[in-house]
Image (tube, rainbow, N blue to C red):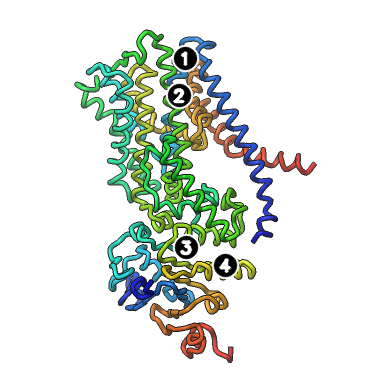
Amino acid sequence: MSDQNATLGLSSVDRSGLRGMVSARVGTWLLIAIALCLPMVVGGSWVFALGVCFANAIGVLSVSVLVRYGGEVSIGHTFFSAVGAYTVAILDTRYGIPLWFSVPLALAFGVVAGILFAWPSRRLSGIYLAVSTLALALAVPEIINNADSLTGGYEGLYVSKPLVPGVKMSLQRYYAALAVLLAVTYGLSRLRHSRQGLTLLLAKSHPAAADAFGTRRVWARIAVMGISGGIAALCGAMLAFAGSTVSPSGFTFWAAIFLLVGSVVSVYGLTFPRALIGGAFLTLIPQFLSASGAWIPVLYGVALLGVILAGHYLPQLTQAMGRRKGGA
Amino acid sequence: MDVLTNALTGQGISLSFGGIKVLKGLDVSFRAGEITGLIGPNGAGKTSLFNCLTGAYSPQEGQIAFAGQSLDGLSPAARASKGIVRSFQHVALSPDLTVLENVMIGVARNHDTGWLNAFLPLPRGCAERAEMERAAMGALADLGLADAAHSLPDALPPGMLRLVEIARAIVGKPDVLLLDEPAAGLNNSETRDLMQTLQKLRSGGLVMVVVEHDMDLVMSICDRIYVLNFGEFVACGAPDEVRRDPDVIRIYLGSDDD
């Protein structure tokens, strides 16, 4: 057996893996530093757009978690983000409760909503689960409009309470979203190495094996939906604060589809840079294309195709080029 | 420890899929401290019996008990928490996890830190992770796999993956260890290593059952052998008795004329 290990060249694999990990970590820290400094460099509208981009990046993470840990796809996560957004907005406008208290509540409500959805749908998977999440997405705007005495109906609600009194509101909206995004990516990086994370990953690929080692597949599904729902609610909470308004138009079926698109574009990554790619695709690319008028959907489609193809083939191309360089 | 009081037993186990009877009223007793072989041609019902014992299948008739306590109605996860673990005929490791992490799952059932520990760097969660890592590394070292601990399963040959599965099964110090074709895909030297490992694992408190097609392995390490054919036991006894049994020779091992 030891001979076998020797022929595998495991130490060289470990070395190259370590190098990759170090460079990825340095890149992430660099990106965080840039994000922290950006408001000092860019103008007000960009600070606002980047704040919304961070909030959307959290939403992208919520879908990616479901894919990575549950092996399932959702096209209805706007339901959970609406739960978070309206928790923050209603507590802010109706009861004057600031973000410090409303965000943890939004997270708790999102987790509960995820669990409540997961329980009846625990035996569904693949296309059947995706379609059942679609029902959530279609129901959200109607639920919001019908509860207009609480939600403000079509007009929505305006979130105005500062997080830290005396600090410029535009900066608060930016940094709060960035802080929550960083907290979520940190939490997810911890989850990956935790006992719960390991068992969830086994339950995704081999549910029978997970069962045989003490992890019930039903528990795994409910746990993943709870986590995903909680993160989506944080996305909604931050969309409400960073975007300052909450209305049904932000939680349509198309918004749910775009969360999935963002997740695909980020290759279901759960790191800060990957989430940013997804969030930027949802927020910044439409802004860049805004001058193109009627061509916006076409150009967006082309950009989407380009990013997906690059995400799919770039690692293989890089690997092939590395091999060629190594051979020469 | 009394081998009979700690036995995994089944009485009258019957299992059908539609109109097809897969297991026909089987009575079994797998004793602690022994290695029991379960052999038979393909389709004889060996894996189905494993699935009944671990709770993956619910037999239509019969009772299954461990150490005198009924296991009927318990889920596979609940049986795992009672120390009944298994390996799989087809390797069932997570491709997203390293070898070490896959093996760590084998001890997960012995730990119970809450969800906050999964997301935050709290002392209990960190200690749990370190303890799981230590146990998994020990099991890998016992099977000569320590060098592969940080590799992903995709990077390893099938024989090694089999051994990783066994490491995952034994790391939690189970009371019942059910191994489904552990030598499948192993070369001769790996099979010899496996035989030594299984013999080392033999202990007073452990019920070990091995489903295997490799007759050399079964005959060398097993204390008792059950021979299954078309859902019925055709023989049961020590390896030498089974080897001489005319029914076994006819249906499974082949006659002298072959």
Residue A119, quarter of picture: top left
Looking at the image, residue A12 sits to the left or right of residue A137; the answer is right
Q: In the image, what residue type sits under mark 4?
A: Leu
Q: Mark 2 and mark 1, same subunit?
A: yes
State the residue at coordinates (39%, 46%): A127
Marks 1 and 3 in Cβ contact (< 8 Å): no
Mark 2 or mark 1: which comes first in sequence? 1
For label 1, the crowd category at 10 Å Cα-Cα, with few meaning under 14, some 14 to 19 and many 20 or more, is many
Mark 4 or mark 3: which comes first in sequence? 3
The N terminus of chain A: image quadrant = bottom right
Q: Mark 4 and mark 1, same subunit?
A: no
Q: Mark 4 and mark 2, same subunit?
A: no
Looking at the image, the residue that sits furthest to the front is B1
Spatial CA distance of label 4 from label 3 is 14 Å
Spatial CA distance of label 2 from label 1 is 11 Å
Q: Pointer 2: what residue? A: A54
Q: Mark 4 and mark 3, same subunit?
A: yes
* Chain identity of mark 3: B
Label 1 secondary element: helix
Q: Pointer 1: what residue? A: A47
Asked whether residue A130 is in view, the answer is no
Label 4 secondary element: helix
Spatial CA distance of label 2 from label 3 is 44 Å
Spatial CA distance of label 1 from label 3 is 54 Å
The C terminus of chain A: image quadrant = top right
State the residue at coordinates (33%, 68%): B66
For label 3, the crowd category at 10 Å Cα-Cα, with few meaning under 14, some 14 to 19 and many 20 or more, is many
Q: Pointer 3: what residue? A: B87
For label 2, the crowd category at 10 Å Cα-Cα, with few meaning under 14, some 14 to 19 and many 20 or more, is many
